[in-house]
Amino acid sequence: MNGSTRLRLRRGALLGPALVWWTALLAAPVLLVLAYSVFQRGVYGGVVYDFSLDNFDRIADSLYLDVLWFSVRVAGEATLVALLIGYPAAWFIATRPERWRTILLVLVVLPFWTSLLIRTYSWMVLLNDEGLINNGLQSLGIIDEPLSLLYNEFAIVLGLTYGYLPLMILPLYAAIERLSPELREAASDLGASGWRAFLTVTFPLTRAGVTAGCIFVFVPSLGNFLVPDLLGGGREQMVGNLIQTQFLKARDWPFGATLALAIIALMTIVLLIQAWINARDRTREVA
Amino acid sequence: MRGRVGGKVLGVGFAATLAFLYLPILVLVVLSFNASGLPTSWGGFTTGWYSELLNNDGLTKAFLNTLIVAFWATLISVVLGTLLAFGLEKAVKSTGLDAVSYIPMIIPDIVLAIALLSFYNLVFTQWLGLSLGLWSVILGHATFGIAFVAIIVRTRLRHFDDSMVEASLDLGANELRTFRHVTLPAITPGIVAGALVAFTLSLDEFVIAFFTAGTSVTFPIQVYSMVRFGVTPEINAAATLVVGVSLVLTVLALRLRGRSETTL
């Protein structure tokens, strides 16, 4: 056996199993479901292989456009709130002595590795009408009637922010930690000039971390099913809930597939914007 | 001076952020020991909800199912993911393949879930006449597990000194012996960490299981259907157990991966 055959055999043995697995159980399924978007639902569910673009007409209906817009808005709000909480938190960690940084970072990331279902459920316990927050406020005499904190947009944004905040903090930390100490010092001086220095000098230098963190929160929020399902209570629907309804209740798989295609398209747009911002920042650094 | 005031504000803000992250979980833990069973009044300490949990056949069966799924998904993920990590670090340098190996981690879970459901339905149910069950969840969980194991093992491989392998080969050990006695021991912590991560992810995964489990029930599916009926003290106990297990596994994984690799 000559060298190049051996090399090829070795490559095949190492890469082959995973690539075959992903061809069969990732590429083929995703392509199949996306192909469903140009077919029709059968009378008794199932897929009828008649080519048509009806599903794309239907998704342009204001009913569904509203749901898509609501999903984008909610995901955007969660991303913004996570950024506002996450940036100072990442800044704090990055400016600690080195041995503290790892510990604090682990503390921030740990909750992310526990079940999203259970972390979302915990907010149901806190937010419902007889929940801890309403009960506490009532016993303190601050409110008479329970506030409706659950099953609305507020609850969904809160749940998504809570679920994905660690994913915002990680890339921000990495970006801030790379800054020179002098730059950080100038910006932590909270006077007017300090703020200006922060906004015009420091913040732009961490923009790669900001865009990465925003992507990490926005993308899983956009297609989320669990958080709007539990905290929106069916009253507020995001596109993930709509897909679930199409697949498991209405049994209109082709239309559900079209909605999934919409999520992927939106994701792609967001990723392109990120790539564009990063590319622009890099050319500026060179210039 | 102003800088110090700013620092204090940051410190208070960070403490509030940690409270935001941990208080909801802590509330569940405390409530799981609350005898009154209500979120709003403390009726004394009890472990009664945990005994109820053990007597709840639906939950215990679902928990066993989840362990089965997580075990097989982890086994597949570790074998294929480790091979892939070697392939991408030592055999082929390709940014295209690198990108492909990230897709299972970033694809929205609902998209993967309906994709797998459609595929299983066509290939396994309609063509082969099989019905979905735990095995179909295992396949789905391994699909993303492979990617996580691969990325973790890769970071370990990158820090591994190739000259050790050369030395071993020069000294007359063949490739297999070198792999077993030099390479494998060096990357074992990475493989174990990857296994723990794959196991934790599978244990907690809900969406793919919900769509592709057929009539089988995993622990997250069972908890989900209980949650939909309302808040009960039993769920708090179940939640506490799951969060506890996940935290222990994650801390172990982080320790194995070493201080510099805490980011994933």
Image (cartoon, coloured by chain):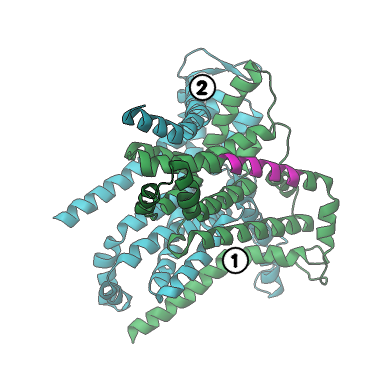
Chain colours: A cyan, B green
Image location of residue A105, percent across then percent down: 47, 66
Q: Amino acid at mark 1?
A: Tyr
SS for dot 2: helix
Seen at 43% across and 40% down, the residue is B101
In the structure shown, which secondary structural element does the residue marked by tag 1 occupy?
A: helix
Marked residue chain, label 2: A
Task: Examine the rendering and report whether any part of residue A17 can be seen.
Answer: yes
Check residue B73 for magenta coloring.
yes
At x 49%, y 70%, the residue is: A103
**Camera-nearest residue between B139 and A5:** A5
Residue B102 visible in this rendered orientation of the protein: no
Name the quadrant containing residue B118.
top right
Q: Residue at label 2?
A: A36
Provide the residue designation for mark 1.
Answer: B22
> Label 1 crowding class (10 Å Cα cut-off): few <14, some 14-19, many 20+?
some
Report which quarter residue B53 is drawn in: bottom right
Magenta part of the chain? B62-76
Q: Are marks 1 and 2 on the same chain?
A: no
Residue closest to the eye, A193 or A215: A215
* Furthest residue in direction front, as rendered: B172
